Image (spheres, rainbow, N blue to C red):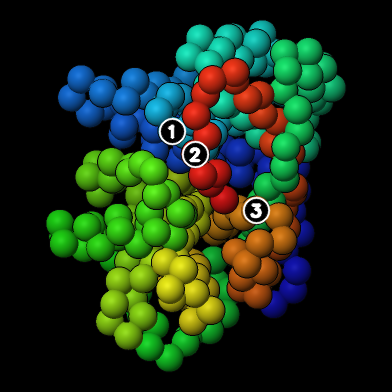
Amino acid sequence: MGTFLPEADHVRRGQAIIGDYAADRVQTIADRPGNPLGAAVRRIAGGAVAVRAPPFGEHAFNRAHGFCDETLAEAEAAADWYAEKDIVASFEISPGRPVTRLLERLHARGYRQTGFHAEFIGPPSLPQAPSPGVQTRPVETAADLAAFSEAYHLGWGHAGFRVPLEPWLGVPGWRLYLGLCDGAPAGAAVLSLSGKDAYLADGAVDPRFRRRGLHRALLDRRCAEASAAGAEVVFSGAEFLSASYRNMLRKGLSLLCTKSIWTRRGDSAPEAPADQ
């Protein structure tokens, strides 16, 4: 299969589905009775999204997506919104639209570039690579969700806090998958579907079961299910040059773009493990 040739429209579509996923993920926290974690979502005309969950500190649950010079005033408002809670917040800056003035304003407010995040794209019908002893299955029961939650938190290294995952099974367009090694729960991943696009999200593997091919198996399963659901393009993301990054390339996905992460660390905000 030849190289997938990304276009500017793909960057826009990738921003849209990734921003929607981030918003849905935090909205499930905000919708809990009484909203005990104080979570909130701001959706901006043009597709920009800012999410906030103060107790999670420096984490993807406190991040803004899709802002550019055309939404400069809204970005300023989002930065004020984070500053209200002294949150360790970040803006993901994607190429493809003008951002010079946005970066000037973020810099003036104390934000600095702190990292890179790679975004991938490809057709869902890519080759699979089965590994011995590795299986994947949909999350359908409370027991499945408990195993999914354990693998998810171990895989992401979330030792200091737990994400409330109970509502995830009911999010429209989401499908959850549990990965197993020799029958033991070992990995977790989410597929988000939106029209002809799909997002391979939140893939995580318990460190005890890494280098067994489970991350790749979760990619394979979600791509196959996205294709069966009618998706024509899949998107995903990974920390630059991480093991996940390499697995995306082995799968046959193409690098769509590299986003820069701009972060302002508050004076007293607690730090938490950074999402990948």
> Which residue is rendered at x = 63% and y = 67% of the image?
243
Q: Secondary structure at mark 2?
A: loop
> Which residue is rendered at x = 72% and y = 23% of the image?
111
Q: Which residue is mark 2?
A: 272
Q: Earlier in the sequence, mark 1 or mark 3?
A: 1
**Image: 235 above or below 71:** below
Q: Secondary structure at mark 3?
A: strand
Observer-nearest of 179 and 140? 179
Q: Secondary structure at mark 1?
A: helix
Q: Earlier in the sequence, mark 1 or mark 2?
A: 1
* The label number, if any, that marks residue 86 in the structure image: none
Q: Which residue is mark 1?
A: 56
Say what amino acid the circle numbered 1 marks. Phe
Tell me how far mark 1 sits from mark 2, CA to CA.
6 Å
Question: Which callout, 1 or 3, points to the residue nearer the camera?
Answer: 1
Mark 1–mark 2 CB contact (< 8 Å): yes
Picture quarter containing residue 55?
A: top left
Counting from the top left corner in percent of width and height, residue 120 is at 65, 56
Picture quarter containing residue 94?
A: top right
* The label number, if any, that marks residue 239 in the structure image: 3
Tell me how far mark 1 sits from mark 3, CA to CA.
19 Å
Say what amino acid the circle numbered 2 marks. Ala
Counting from the top left corner in percent of width and height, residue 148 is at 30, 60
